[in-house]
Amino acid sequence: MLTLVAQNHWNLHLHSSLAELQKIPTFIDEIPPLRRLKEDKQYFLKLSLHELATNAIVHGNKLVSEKKVQINLQIERDKILITISDEGSGFTKEVYDNIMRSDPTVKEGGRGLRLVKETMELVSLHTSNGKFSLTFEMIA
């Protein structure tokens, strides 16, 4: 369900089911400022959210349908900030760094994170409440 949290700040809550991923394009389409994005930016934003939500559902919440995934999208001037939270145990900066350093032709996994890193202008790494998380930024 799309929720306007504050001016230029929206949330989408998903159950941990792959069927829930179909809500992401509608979520983006319903946010008025995002309708002004160029078509390629809209495509990459939808693709990135799909990949990140898939990771949260499959790897974070282990497909336990009672667990939730929350997508926070905030627009600040010309930046789109995205944070995705799940109810999993999280992962460390070292795991993230290893995924980014590994050869995708040799090691299976990490494709979604690599793809998102390529489509976003900035990926910020931070720890909150003992849990490592990522914030993604795209220039609108």
Image (spheres, rainbow, N blue to C red):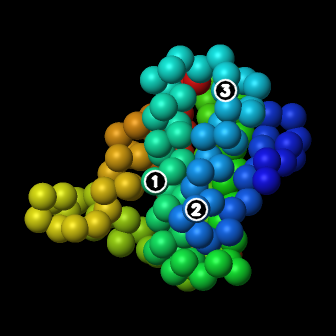
| Residue type for callout 1 | Glu
Q: Quadrant of the C terminus?
A: top right
Count of labels in the image = 3
Q: Locate residue 7 relative to residue 87 in the image: left or right.
A: right
Q: Nearer the viewer, mark 2 or mark 3?
A: 2
Q: Position of residue 124 (x, y in %)?
A: 51, 50
Q: Nearer the viewer, mark 1 or mark 2?
A: 2
Please state which amino acid type lies under the numbered disc 2: Ala
Residue 4, compared with residue 12, is above or below; it is above
Contact, CB < 8 Å: mark 1 with mark 3? no
User: CB of mark 1 within 8 Å of CB of mark 2?
Assistant: no
Q: Which residue is mark 1?
A: 51
Q: Position of residue 61 (x, y in %)?
A: 57, 77
Label 1 or label 3, whichever comes before in sequence order: 3
> For mark 2, does the 10 Å Cα neighbourhood hold few (<14), some (14 to 19), or many (20 or more) residues?
few
Residue 74 against residue 60 in the figure, above or below: above
Image location (x, y in percent) of residue 42: 54, 29
Mark 1 and mark 2: Cα distance apart in space: 13 Å
Q: What secondary structure is found at the residue carrying circle 1?
A: helix
25 versus 127 height, above or below: above
Q: In this rendering, does residue 35 appear at all?
A: yes
Within-10-Å neighbours for mark 1: few <14, some 14–19, many 20+: some
Secondary structure of the residue carrying tag 3 is helix
Tell me the CA gap for discs 1 and 3. 19 Å
Label 2 to label 3: alpha-carbon separation: 23 Å
Identify which residue is drawn at 59% across, 51% down.
22
Question: At x 73% / y 53%, what residue is drawn?
Answer: 12
Q: Residue beneath label 2, please?
A: 19
The tag earlier along the polypeptide, 2 or 3, is 2
Provide the secondary structure element on which disc 2 rests. Answer: helix
Name the residue beneath numbered marker 3.
Answer: 34
